[in-house]
Structure formats: C-alpha cells, structure tokens
Image: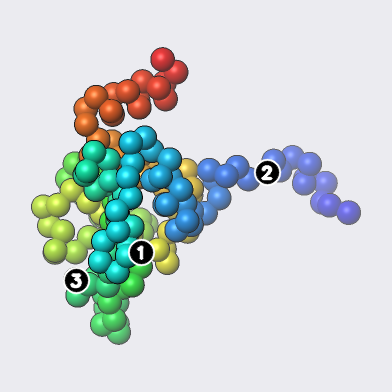
Amino acid sequence: MPPPYAAYAGPVSDEARPARVEDVHELAEAMPHVTVVYGTGENPVYQVGGRSFVFFRNPRPDAFDPETGERYPDVIVFWVPSDADKQAMVQDESSPFFTTPHFNGHPSVLLRGSRIGELTRGELAEVVQDAWLSRASARRAATWLKDRQGG
C-alpha cells in the first residue's frame, strides 16, 4: 500500500528530471534551421546558419582530470550570449560548467557529459536555446522568440 502522502506527489515532469547526454542531441536538433556536421572523431557539431552553437569535443590537453592527468573524453561545448553569462556560469561553485585557458575570450562554456545529470532537462534546454540564440541570425532569433510567446 502506498504511503498516504503519495497521492499528493505529482509525477516528475520531463523538464524536472536529471538531464542526459541524449537530451543535448534532442534539444539541439529540435531548434529551427539546425544542421549537423561531423567534426574530427565523427563528433556532432550542431549549427544554425553555418555557425556552431553546440559541439562535442575530442579529448584535448586543456581539459583534463587534475588528479590523473587524463584528458576528459566527454566535453560538450555550448556557446553563450556574452562573457558575463559565461562568467556567471563558470564562477558558480555549484555549477557543472567550466572553462579552460584555451577558451579565454571565447563565448562558450564546457560541460562534461558525466556531470550533465547535475542539471535538469529544463535547465539544459535553456542552455541549448541560449546557445542557439547567440548564434542564430537576428531574424531567426526574433522569429523563434515571437513564436514561443504565442504571436
């Protein structure tokens, strides 16, 4: 028999569940005018208007485990709207986002796939949407925002 409070606990919405790497692909592909190209190692690169907004990196010397020195094999790069947004994301100690000196001055943040579950799917959706908005043309961005507001 379920506990008496179970009747009050509604189902966990899809947006509130922990994010998964598969969600990155699904969310990026769902944005309008997206094409997928494949970089080195056949890693997907999501683009809008020929401009990358999310991509999966190969292991690189700038992103590594400080204890073992092993390169991270699961780094995902997300463009951000501004350096202020980037700093807010990487300076928050509770955030799984990070950067490396290689990305100094670059409007993007990094996230290890192994830590993606620290975000909800809804939070990840916002990151992907912001990445897309930061790279889409002004016309496409305005149309998408207008459509989301219902008119």
According to the image, label 1 marks what residue?
112
Label 3: how many residues lie within 10 Å, few (<14), some (14-19) or many (20+)?
A: few
How far across and down, in percent of the image, does residue 61 sit?
19, 75
Q: In which quarter of the image is residue 70?
A: bottom left
Q: Distance between the residues labelled 3 and 2?
A: 41 Å
Task: Give amino acid for label 1.
Answer: Arg
Q: Which of 111 and 94 is in front in this view?
A: 111
According to the image, label 2 marks what residue?
11
According to the image, label 3 marks what residue?
62
Q: Which of 95 and 19 is in front in this view?
A: 19
Q: In percent of the image, x 27 and y 72: which residue is there? A: 59
Labels 2, 1: front one: 1
Q: In percent of the image, x 14 and y 64: which residue is there? A: 101
Q: Residue furthest left?
A: 105
The secondary structure type at the circle numbered 1 is strand
The secondary structure type at the circle numbered 3 is loop
